[in-house]
Image (spheres, rainbow, N blue to C red):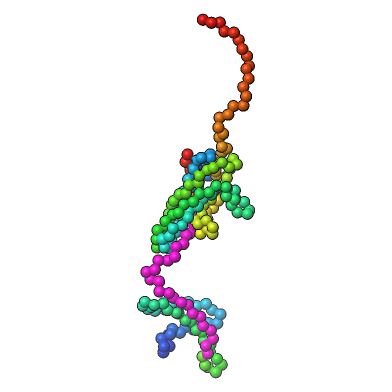
Amino acid sequence: MRDAAGAMQVVVPAGATHAWYDSFVMPEQSVTVTAVSWYLGGDDTWYPDDRAEEDVGLEAGDVPDSDFGLIEIAGYERRA
Amino acid sequence: MGGVYVPSQFGVVFLPLAPVQVSPGDTLRVTCRYSHYGAAEDVVLYAAIGNHGWAGFDEVLKGSKTVSVPEDLAWTNHEDYVDIVVSAKAPGYYDLYAKIDGGIPRVTSPVLQDVIELLAEVTESEFGEIAITGCAGVEAG
């Protein structure tokens, strides 16, 4: 379900871990994904509780940084 | 050279175990296999023989060379070698290891224990003493 602004709304039981998926278009610029939690007050009103943000960089076409996994000695020999 | 085939991230790898004998003046060629991912760069492939102990690896002889690693958009295995020029050191068995980049290694190989036997330097020909041990007359003709 989405709200009027288009944000996806998901009900997560207290203490539970829940994952869901959504997608977005980010033409030619990076974006920031924001998650906000709300709780239902005793007066039946929703109040904002916590929030987290994750930057998603535009890296299409970029070569990742060089990295080495492991190295092994495959052989050794004497050469006079 | 003897050895065993052991499983590794590269599949099955031949692990040489038989010591190789080297003498001063020889070159020890160490072939290394490593995995890489990402942009191309030049790195230093480094190998050393020495003694591996609780405090780390005490290098006795070492060799290095610059290796140009290509761009790899997936984890890719590469193989290259580095030569260690053998000079006169205390004879005996030594350990062997390799790494990429020296000061702060990017990746370090397992240590192969006692696989290099360094032989004593052969000294130049020398005579100690000479003595006449006998003499006899020999008839002419």
Which one is in front, B66 or B136?
B136
The structure residue drawn at horizontal position 39% and vertical position 61%, both measured from the top left corner, is: B71
Q: Position of residue A27 (x, y in %)?
A: 36, 78
Which one is in front, B70 or B78?
B70
Residue A57 part of the magenta-drawn span: yes
The structure residue drawn at horizontal position 48% and vertical position 53%, both measured from the top left corner, is: B45
* Residue B69 left/right relative to B136: left
The structure residue drawn at horizontal position 52% and vertical position 56%, both measured from the top left corner, is: B102
Q: Position of residue B121 (x, y in %)?
A: 56, 37
Q: Position of residue B110 (x, y in %)?
A: 54, 53
- Residue bounds of the magenta highlight: A47-71
- Relative to A18, does residue A80 appear above or below in the rendering? above
- Relative to B120, does residue B133 appear above or below in the rendering? above
Q: Dividing the picture into quarters, in which one does residue B88 lie?
A: top right
Q: Dividing the picture into quarters, in which one does residue A57 lie?
A: bottom left
Q: Position of residue A5 (x, y in %)?
A: 41, 88
Residue B116 part of the magenta-drawn span: no
- Relative to B1, does residue A4 appear above or below in the rendering? below
> Farthest residue toward the bottom?
A43
The structure residue drawn at horizontal position 39% and vertical position 77%, both measured from the top left corner, is: A29
